[in-house]
Amino acid sequence: MRGLRLALPPAAPDTSGAAGVFYALGGIVIICDAGGCAGNICGFDEPRWQSQKSAVFSAGLRDMDAILGRDDQLIAKLKSAASSVNANFAAIVGTPVPSVIGTDYHALCRMGHKETGIPVIAIPSDGTHLYDYGEEKAYLALFETFSREKKQTKKEHRPHVIGVLGVTPLNTSMMNAEYKLRTFYADKYNDIWCYGAEGGLSPIENAAMADMNLVIATSGLESAWYLKQQFGTPFRIWNPFAEEAAESLLASSILKETDDNTEQILILHQQIYACSMRTALRKKLPDAGITVGSWFQMDERLTEPQDISLREEDDLKTVADDYDIIIGDSSMQKIIPDYRGKFIDCPHFALSGRLSDGREATVQ
Amino acid sequence: MSHAPFSITAGELSNLGSKNIPDELVSGRHLIYNSPAALSFNSPGAHGFGVKRAGMAIPGSVMLLVSPGCCGRNTSQIMAGPEYGKRFFYFLLDENDIVTGKHLNRIPQAVKEIVDHLKEKPSMVMICITCVDALLGTDMERVCRKAEKAADVKVRACYMYALTRDSRKPPMVAVRKSVYSLLEKGKKESDTCNILGFFSPLSDECELYPMLKSFGVNRIQEISRCKDFNEYTKLSHANFNLVLNAEARLAADDMEQRLHIPSIELTRLYEIDKIENQYKSLGQVLNVVFHDSRYRVEAQNAVDRFCEKHSDAAISIGSVLNANAFELALALIKYGLTVTEIFADPTPGDFTYIHRIARLRPSVRIYSNLSPTMLHYHADEHPATIAIGEDACWYHKKAAHLPWNDEVQPFGYHAVTNLFNQMSRILEKDKKVVSK
């Protein structure tokens, strides 16, 4: 039945995705909710929350706010918070409540900017979409609002800078992805800007200075196209973490046993991770049939004919037995308890709330 | 721009009075800072019982959460527990549903599919709905009736309406009523009473059990101790309800109306003399005399032992704990201890305690976990020897920690005894660590 989940809890929603992109930027982030969404976002979907303070606030909406649409009170609360928090911008993250009552986000942004003097952006997330949708909208809003035309030539300024899109714990299932990316690319680039993950707004403001962008998750694709269009920055779609994971699998006994190389493999993850893993695996397993599947957005430009988009639990049940090996977050095994093939765990925080080092989303 | 957390002394707050509580201490008048210390406000279930977990208090029940995906996200944390693993199901709404309410027609079918999917038929299906349906004005009783017919199982609704947090019937009050709503009028048994208020049991050592038994109340029932649905139905046989948490008052009123079970309300207190008075009053209502001196002396001894050794300890008290933060602070101050700060939003009812704290120790500082200014709170500027409450522990990483937030509920003299014994234990342990 459409929408019914018997085995898996919902994946990370768009609200968490958007908030995650803003988390480390030094702005005020207002979850436009009654409280529960903010609790879910920080208490479950944001592993940095325990160790890194951020001005993430709930609007604390109450029934009369929703019924009477008291936007002026929300702006007054924002103004009051802005007077005690050094913030260079504010972001309003939508939830089901403003979606149902038809909140005018443009008006909120204009009113907020007028009252506080700082730029205010809004993401019309509504909790019914998945995290990658929220991330995509948040990245795009940031670049559209803050990225400036380059004033100097690249060589005069910062040669060999690579910008990376999609570095969030929800995508990478890691807390140290920036550090690892530096290791991967230290010999090729002088600097690595993980947009949204570190360095505040500066990398986003100076995005035009990057020599190239690397897109490691589908949520960064729209922004990569935007930056190409605006500033001519080329981009590459590749996830080095997936490549590393594939190499590790190939080196282990898990895939070595399947040496006839003709097996059918299904990789379930966010699309760019899964596609990168497929490319890496194909180098050693050229005859294997490898399918990419995802619960999240699938860009047609990256899709091969056999690839599958999953929406309902039944979608996975129907196809699982067509594959000898499934690589994906082990939480999905609950959907297919009778699956007889080999299930290789590849954590995806946005699904299970599990980091790749084994830590889980927990409170305190 | 101020870079200090908002705080006010007990003396200043007492002078302002309950009608002039500063905006920073009223959650509806500012943005809510979402720190780990404030999580239990935004997401009560993250630490203990929120609506989702509480809604499954009926033995053998399962829950269908009808909501956008975002409302069910943290449920996987609850599902990790062995008793809940296979009892949660989700019916996810899309954009169209949250605007048109079309999902309501499909709920009966969803309930039927869940019942068919389960090896064992559940005792009932609790449908949990969220802010979306609050705004749509959904008539859940009608939907539940339709679902009952479709799936041939009892179906009730509980309401996770965070929007109504400040209303007369906030979510945690409404859910208490929901979990007792399946009880039907039964034969009264004079030696039976119910304890209402919590979703987990009172501590086995609590004096309330032997004291009630001493005058013939042989069966003391709690929903959390019901092993199966049959035991749950026997809650309707009680002669009276003891309400230990004001959030259960609505449920008790409903039981009084429907099942003719009267109720008596008691408050969890940490002032020994007030506990004694409360038991005296209970005795008068029940027309018995409680012999509580043994428990009272035990509690007093635990207090004295602690005060003797640790009277100089600076104590920080939070509000995420099994106590009213202000009442606990007052009790500790009365025992001669040094409470330096309290993290809690005061309600008008708390001023009974605040005025008395102000008289005894007006310098105690009161902070709100929820104020955006708490971004600037740094524990190093407010040293504490011992932090009581999960939130206080989070702020004071270097202090001795007593979360005092176990699911098993403390009450009465035993709560005082246990609290002080634990305080002594953790400070002794802390000293040993320091000396090593």
Image (spheres, grey):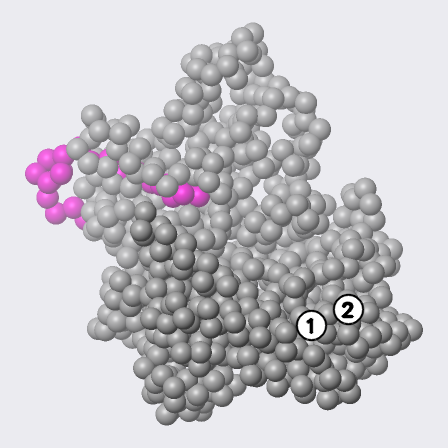
Say which residue appears at 38% left-offset and 64% top-offset.
B386
Q: Tell me if residue A151 is in the magenta stretch.
A: yes
Q: Position of residue A362 (x, y in %)?
A: 49, 49
Q: Which residue is mark 2?
A: B220
Q: Nearer the viewer, residue B90 or B369?
A: B369
Is residue A263 found left or right of B391 in the rendered image? right
Say which residue appears at 58% left-offset and 37% top-offset.
A331
**Pointer 2 indicates a residue of which chain?**
B
Q: Position of residue B123 (x, y in %)?
A: 82, 55
Is residue A289 found left or right of B293 in the rendered image? left
Q: Nearer the viewer, residue A302 or B357?
A: B357
The residues bearing labels 2 and 1 have C-alpha atoms spaced at a distance of 10 Å
**Numbered label attached to residue B208:** 1
Amino acid identity at mark 2: Ile
Say which residue appears at 24% left-offset and 70% top-offset.
B3
Write down the quadrant of residue B182 in the picture: bottom right
Q: Position of residue A66 (x, y in %)?
A: 53, 74
Q: Mainly helix, strand or loop, the magenta region?
A: loop
Q: Position of residue B213 (x, y in %)?
A: 78, 72
Write down the quadrant of residue B400 in the picture: bottom left
Residue B20 appears in the rendering? no
Upstream in the sequence, badge 2 or badge 1?
1
**Seen from this angle, which residue lies furthest top?**
A260
From the viewer's perspective, is residue A256 above or below residue A321?
A: above
Q: Which residues are magenta?
A: A149-171
Q: Nearer the viewer, mark 2 or mark 1?
A: 1
Q: Are marks 2 and 1 on the same chain?
A: yes
